[in-house]
Amino acid sequence: MMDKGLPGKHPLARMGIWGHPWHGLVGVSALGQLTLPNGQLRTYQQPGWPAVPGVTPRSSSRGMTHLVRVPGVAPPVRSEDEQAADAVAGRQWRSEAMLSGGRLQLYGKPLDGWIYIDPEGARWLVRCPQLAEGAAAASVWTVTLTRFGALGAPGETYTHEVASPFPGKTARLEAISPVGNHVVVAIDVAAAPFELAAAWAELSVAGAGAAAAVGAAVLRTEAQTASYSKPEVPSTSYWWVAGTHEEPVFSENGDSGGQEFSESAGGGPYEARRIIAFWYAPDGALKEVALRNHGDCAEANPRGTDRRICTLSASGTIAIEVDGVAVLAVPCALEAVRSWVLDGQITRYPLSGELSVGGRSVLIERDSSNLPGLGLGSLIAAEYRLGFSPPGNGDHSASALPVFHSRQVLGLALRATRSYGLNSTTLDHSPVVSPSGGLTGAWRTEPVSAVFYGSHCPHTGQVVAFSPDPVCWV
Amino acid sequence: MSARDLQRSIESIVGVRPGYKPLDPPPPVGARAGAVATGRPAGGAGTQGVLFEEADFLQREYWAAQTFASSDGLFTLQVEPIRSILLTGGQRMRFSEPVEPPAP
């Protein structure tokens, strides 16, 4: 939109302010409707994702936003009369812009690319189809820079090819720096709802756009993305804490000549951590968001000749950390007990205990007649789960699952389950963490099937979460 | 440009040419309600010899191009401000270069 007085209308006209003054939340009143600050609705394209056949859209892409900041642009100066007129009309003149939704929408138009502002202040539209939602795995990324925003100037396009630092893996754009010179790329993202990336890359653009240097590098390796305190464990999603996987041995002919149990003890600190998101601060600083489950466990299988009580206990927290600082933390704990009596024969007593995360808990109870062997069970832990596996099939778990309301609005959902018996039909959802810092919202209980949308406004810092329909700031 | 600015611009032209008298001040504006005029403007003594009418569009002169950016800086326009126009009387009507004072 242009204010009155564009040159050309009149040779003596004065240049007014111009640009795009329509900002607010799209979708909160109705899909495709922007709610202006004066309360009026304005028809606006709902930020979305590419329509790729066969690709299940990610709900988290619909509300994602990226700040665009041209260096040196001062906030607009408006007279009191102009401010009053703007307020009546619902206009907001800003010195920065944002790209909204999975297709990186600007002024209501999908760009399918981002804007790079080169050191001379020239703007370039940067596109890389291999980073789009649902793009096939590739080993080479094609990056095109097209002159952007210079009205009336001749078009220029330059194409670069860079080798993917993770050849053959799928890649998806995650975060864009405010001047577009750095882009974080999520590698090999798992299917919804978890959407956990296996590794992270960074695409960079430097120099004047016509002679730009385009590069791609590893930002975080697989090992840095998902790290565990027991790296010898083959699985990347859980491990058996040292000591607990060894079944206590029953000996008919021990040193005493009679019946006895062997003795064992194990445990110690456990930790599982995974980087789940990257954000850019308005000043361009990169922020690392991780899910971290850490604590201590102890196991005792004491020696005994006639009676034995084995215990396993663990306590810790599952947290969302931003740059290493826990913003949201949920306590979790495990207690399990099993006993036997030897009196010429083995008498087993039922396994009992409790596993909890936040306000959610599940009782551990198994009939002695169903318990094979003499083992107590094992602690299992992943970055979002504390679990217990009794002898035989099945396990119990207390989970704090990551929930992506958008790529920048994250929460946890608590669930306690056991593989035999009833599973809960509801989840306890936490307040959300966002680039604005702190927490937004309150704990709430929702059906397991509920899908939520959210969005963070990089200009105002406002956060919306738990929306049943897609929403996005523009 | 306001009526007063225009008046000053015209006066500046008139002032550098010997033999021209200063122009009359502009008539007061806004005191009367709008009315439909039917007569032709009378040629007053003060405007004698200066008819503010462009002779030839192709004779326009422009200042160096200025860049106007959208409020967020993403879009830019290149605009050449008008520098002078040729009047039918043969004189050139000159305009100052529109340079905004630096922000305080």
Image (cartoon, coloured by chain):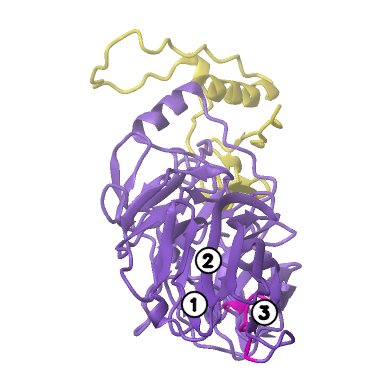
In reply to whether residue A69 is colored magenta, the answer given is no
Chain in purple, by letter, is A
Specify whether A219 is left or right of A335.
Answer: right
Q: Tell me where residue A403 appears, x and y as whole percent.
A: 45, 61
Which residue bears the numbered disc 2?
Answer: A336
Query: How many numbered marks does the figure carry?
Result: 3
Q: Chain of mark 1?
A: A
Residue B2 at x, y percent in the picture? 50, 24
Q: As drawn, which residue projects farthest toward the top?
A: B31
Please report the residue visible at 49 percent of the width from the left and 87 percent of the height from the top: A136
Which chain letter matches label 2? A
Q: What amino acid is at disc 3? A: Glu
Say if B58 sits above or below A211 in the image.
Answer: above
Residue range of the region highlighted in magenta in the rendering: A237-252
Q: Secondary structure at mark 2?
A: strand
The residue lying at 51 percent from left, 82 percent from top is A346
First in sequence, mark 2 or 1: give its number.
2
Name the foreground residue: A10 vs A318.
Answer: A318
- Do tag 2 and tag 1 residues touch (Cβ < 8 Å)? yes
Mark on residue A222?
3
Task: State whether residue A359 is above or below residue A11.
Answer: below
In front of the other: label 3 or label 2? 2
Majority SS type along the magenta span:
loop
| Chain identifier, yellow in the render | B
- 3D distance between C-alphas at marks 2 and 1: 9 Å
Work out whether disc 3 and disc 2 sit on a shared chain: yes
User: What label sits on residue A390 in the rendered view?
Assistant: 1
In the rendered image, residue B41, in percent from the top left (x then y), is placed at 35, 21
Sort mark 2 into few (<14), some (14-19) or many (20+) by Cα contacts within 10 Å: many
Residue A166 at x, y percent in the picture: 66, 85
